[in-house]
Amino acid sequence: MKSRIRIIGNDTLIFDHSRGSNAFDMLQQQTINFLKELEQNNYREWFQDHKPWYQESLADFKNFASKVGQELMKSDEIDRMTVYRIYRDLRFSTDKTPYKNHFSAHFARKGKYRRGGLYLEVFSKEVLVAGGFWNPHKDDLRFIREGIAVDPEALRNTLAHPEVESRFGHLEGDELKTAPKGYDRDHPQIDLLRKKQFLLTRIYSHQTAGKKDFYKSVASDFTAMIPVFQIFTEYLVYDLNGEER
């Protein structure tokens, strides 16, 4: 049986559940080695001379991300997966190194009632597993703050759950230095109301990333984020009277 997830980018990957269970269970060491060498040789001549190595490493990362997606679909619905290009946009940057020093992918959850994005980033020394709301639209940010002000306990209790706290610690993200407009700086929920981003993150060493079935650990982390996302979904989908927006 095959189930398709749309991939935005250079190509489309098929999540094929008929594959052997050991296919792409871990990131290959050669992929980590490529990223390590790229950090030391981030210029076009080196990259072009090692293009086949890059292509093999990118394919390994896509295969691994696809495996994560397959596992994640056992507990959630994913609409699409974006594998980001390694080429940096240099137009507005003072850093003119042409390539990113990592591979990355984003998993978009399906539908209005499944908010929150999921993000995977692989460096030579570590792997970042992250999810949440990165720079939400101004209206969405307003809805989230209204929800927090009226019903903070649902969010706080979910964030304090051992399954969440042990994996991710606390809620991260950029925040205002003072209270947002319309809220007093002494508001009892000011620590949450100041936030402009709402993120959960976990970092693994590259040694852990090379272990068998590492994809299951990543998918398990993403699944553990979902109860938190569902609180934000309630804030976003329903107004303060409980009516759907």
Image (cartoon, rainbow, N blue to C red):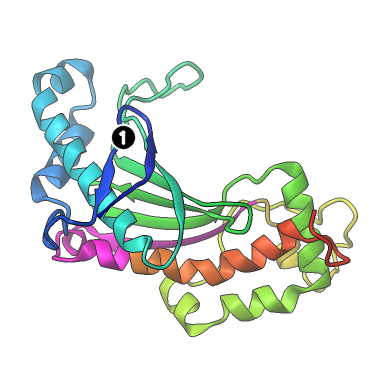
For the residue pair 105 and 34, the one nearer the viewer reads as 105
Q: Which residue is mark 1?
A: 12
In the image, taking residue 209 as reference, residue 152 lies left or right, namely: right
For the residue pair 165 and 71, the one nearer the viewer reads as 71
- Kindly give the residue lying farthest to the bottom in the view shown: 162
Q: Is residue 232 above or below residue 141?
A: below
Q: Residue at x 82, y 68 (%)?
A: 149
Picture mark count: 1
Q: Is residue 245 above or below residue 159?
A: above
Q: Is residue 168 above or below residue 24?
A: below
Picture coordinates of residue 182, whole percent (x, y): 90, 54
- In magenta stretch: residue 61: no
Residue span colored magenta: 197-218
User: Quarter of the image holding residue 194?
Assistant: bottom right
In the image, taking residue 131 as reference, residue 189 lies left or right, namely: right
Q: Residue at x 57, y 58 (%)?
A: 114
User: Quarter of the image holding residue 82?
Assistant: top left
- Kindly give the residue lying farthest to the front in the view shown: 1
Badge 1 crowding class, 10 Å Cα cut-off, few under 14, some 14 to 19, many 20 or more, is some
In the image, taking residue 42 as reference, residue 30 lies left or right, namely: left
Picture coordinates of residue 109, whole percent (x, y): 50, 53
- In magenta stretch: residue 216: yes
Tell me which amino acid carries mark 1. Answer: Thr
Q: Quadrant of the N terminus?
A: bottom left
Picture coordinates of residue 151, whole percent (x, y): 78, 73
Q: Residue at x 21, y 59 (%)?
A: 209
Q: Residue at x 49, y 77 (%)?
A: 165
For the residue pair 38 and 51, the one nearer the viewer reads as 51
Element under label 1?
loop
